[in-house]
Amino acid sequence: MQIDLSVRNITKKFKDFIAVKSVSFDVKDGQFFSILGPSGCGKTTLLRMIAGLTEPTEGVIEIRGKSMVGIPPNKRPVNLIFQQLALFPMMNVGENIAFGLFRRGEKKTIIKKKVETILERVELSGFENKKIDQLSGGQKQRVAIARCLVLEPAVLLLDEPLGALDLKLREQMKVELKKLQAKVGTTFVYITHDQSEALVMSDFVAVMNNGEFEQIDTPQNLYNNPKTPFVAQFVGDNNTWTGRIRQCDKYIAEIETDEGHLFRTKVEDAFQTGLSVDLFLRPEAMLIQPAPNIANLNRFKVIIKSILFDGANSQLLATRPDSKKELLVALPQNRQYDYIQVNDNIEIGWNEQSGICFPRKQLP
Amino acid sequence: MKHQKRWALFFFLTPVILWLFLLIVLPHIDLLIMSFRIENDAGEMVWSLSNYAQFFEEPIYWRTFVRTAVYSILVTFLTFVIALPVALYITKVVAPRFQGFLTLLLLLPFWVSELVRVYGWMILLRESGVINHFLIKLGILNRPVEMLYNDATMILGLIYTSMLFMIVPLIAVLESLDNSLIEAAYDLGANMWTILFKIIIPHATPGIVSGSIVVFMLTLGNYLTPNLMGGKNSLWFTEQIYNQFIASFNWNQGSAFGFLLLVLSSIVVWLGLKLTRQTLRTVVK
Amino acid sequence: MIRSLPKSKTYSIGFKLYIVLYFVFLFAPLFITCVLAFNDSQFPSLPWKGFTVEWFTANQSERVGIFNDQINLDSIWVSAQVAFFVTLFSVVAGTCGAFLFEQEDFRLKQLLYFLMLSPLVIPGVILGISILLFSNTLGTYFEISWNLDVALFRPGFWLVVLGQFSFIATLVTLVVSARLKKFDYTLEEAALNLGANRFGVIWHITLKFLRPAIVGAGAVAFLMSFENFNTTLFLVGYEATLPINLYLQVRDGSTPVINAISFLLIIGTSTAACLHLYFSKKED
């Protein structure tokens, strides 16, 4: 498959601050590629460098094999959807979409046809003469996308375009955007700080932190096999412990947490005894009242402190009898656990394959 | 409460009514009446259109009038062309920490009396002026040239005088232009000129209109600059009014001229507002 | 193009050059005026003949510095007095106007509002002549009807004050209105609720809130009045204001005394402008 976007060792320094540190990645034709990171991690700067709105300090960006060094944004085969969409309020929908086509000097009749087609694609047929301020949030979104897609860019860049929408619409647009991308087949590079957006929509996700990529992987792998503590923490909910390795044989280690509990968990490497580690565990990895015959479980008793009912995301807040540390346990809403009450004493178990363990970084 | 309410209205209304009626409405009605009165041979005041007839019959009058109008439009346009890049630079290009300082610097000269500013140009431009002095020193000229007292310097002076009233609304309106619109246009393939004409100028229209109206009006009604910097042949219509009032002491003729100038300025302001579909109220803001 | 975007060298340098030229254009006349105030020459022109402050301090037959120039000093004093009264009247009328147009409701409010704005689009010269005409008409009427000779109706100090007031009051109204728009009316309601009457509320609450705008508008009104020429030209009597007086001198040939006065004006107004800006920034 063709590589649409190739970024090699790109770096951006602002005065005494490094926004992006030697980032490299490839995006293949037709992929939905997300860059996920907290605000201020450098993801917007990275996107602006690809669009040509910011000049990189070092490194090369290639689009369809062509180096973009020195090529201004108005000459690049990429287009950017801005965070606030940046639809031109002085033009109507049709004029907004035709803007780029006119700049290319295409014929009026062709432009008209193309605008019609693309509006149909985004399900806004007949909206040509509407003013921008007459549109709803979701419609504006689609106009912004249409305005870029009509130019048939090699890569479409999206800068948190769902950020301004309210929750309900955001959920809806997530699905719509993914469908739209599948339909048009354009390569998308999408940046967001919202892990759910990235996981739902993307083929690949790069997790970015402090100007560097921590991991590039499929959403499933990011969630199940995070390669760094940052990824483990940033993607999904966690229970975390700190502790030391008691003993380690091949890929199963026994860890004694700071609270004095013993857990067995898989590890990536053979860790030395006594090594400080962080242990992460997803709330849904904890089984409530596991059957006695299931092997390889870390089993312990907890007291229910609180039931956090939130539909499909309901959780139990629990502590072990001899500790104050609060644990989050997923509470499946399949009526099986309706009997659980606050202050109940129940058994919890988690499979040693579910734990995610990293050596603790020595703080400088 | 109701009673108090009425008293408050009365209290605020009285000074405003006195001000507007005694100093604006009645004087202008008087101006209109005076312009239709002449002294007949018997020395009595009678109604007549002859003050206006005089204006159209005497080429020097209506030519000056047309000249003043055309030059005022030219000055307004040139002021806009010169001011726009400066406003753009201050709002969009210069580093934000210099913004306040540059704006202050920009406004400073306009706090100084117009007379002082015109005087400054006079000692720069006149035959014995500073620019001539340097040009001769540098060997570019052999003998001094009179740069003052022609149409070009008069226009320069008028532009200089009215610059502030263009630049302030432009800065205000460009401040509200979202940078991402410019970036989006650039990203969609636009070049600098397209961005200027398709994004920046359409966005800035309210500011351009309010700036232009004020500049036009001030230029049209300016007396000082054309009088001191313009030549004997660059008469300004306000000078005609002054001549009628102070020199010829023909107040009726002067009133007619004054009224014509008022009508011209009102028409242009009204047209400007209509063409851009704005109201005086929004322009004032 | 804009600061966030990469741009070519030629473009940035060209743009910067333009801005520098613009500022030169802006300051050249003021700068040269100030410099020549200190030239030891009979004329406000180059060549430079050495530094002197005589155009401020001298009191000789061929050189009278501004501090000893009675005519110019008198005109400054006249201007200051005119500006004082114009400021006083404009602030009172303008504040009333602001309350009237922001808080009151009455028939024909729109018409009155439009009238209030009209001085903005009436050229100053026209304002001058129409007020001159009207005062003359009134004066004639009073004289014929009651045989009264009212000094107010002849060109002179008070007519200048009224002429300038007629348009400066509009400006004050607009500035004070802008501030009044930001006023939180629940404060007024709270005060009313606590037993204050309407004038009490205005005096204790609203006017306190408006004070920065009133002071700022007053400062601008003073400056505008002090420097007004167009309207004053037609209304002035024997007591010339400073701009009129300077105009007559400039028209009939000039001496560096004018530079000295200009220098003082430039320094004075710049300081006032900076203070005004500083305080209005602080209020925000």
Image: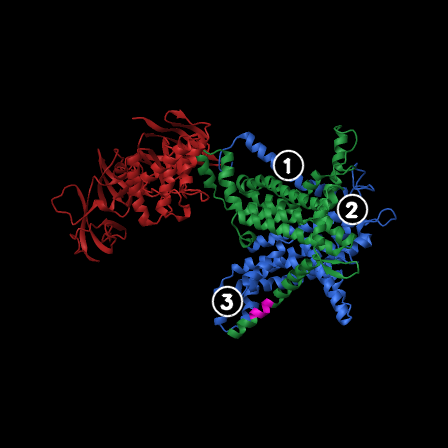
Residue type for callout 2? Arg
Q: Is residue C271 left or right of residue A138?
A: right
Q: Is residue C10 left or right of residue A354?
A: right
Overall secondary structure of the magenta stretch?
A: helix
Magenta stretch: give its range. Answer: B8-13
Q: Is residue B248 left or right of residue C189?
A: right
What is the secondary structure assignment of the residue under circle 2?
Answer: helix
Query: Label 3 marks which chain's residue?
Result: C
What is the secondary structure assignment of the residue under circle 3?
Answer: helix
Q: Earlier in the sequence, mark 1 or mark 2?
A: 1
Q: CA distance from mark 1 to mark 2?
A: 29 Å
Q: Which residue is mark 3?
A: C188
Q: Which residue is mark 1?
A: C21
Q: Compared with residue B173, is residue A26 higher up or lower down, i.e. above or below?
A: above
Does the magenta segment cover residue A82?
no
Chain B: colour as depicted: green
Q: Compared with residue B105, is residue A24 higher up or lower down, i.e. above or below?
A: above
Q: Earlier in the sequence, mark 1 or mark 3?
A: 1
Discs 1, 2 touching: Cβ within 8 Å:
no
Front in this rendered view, residue A137 or B154? B154
Q: Is residue C84 among the parts visible in the rendering?
A: no
Does the magenta segment cover residue B12?
yes
Query: Label 1 marks which chain's residue?
Result: C
Residue type for callout 3? Glu
Residue farthest to the right, as pictured: C61
Front in this rendered view, residue C27 or A215? C27
Q: Which residue is mark 2?
A: C251
Residue type for callout 1? Leu
Which percent across, then down, holds residue A152?
Answer: 36, 32
Image quarter where the C terminus of chain C lies is bottom right
Residue farthest to the front, as pictured: B41
Q: CA distance from mark 1 to mark 3?
A: 52 Å
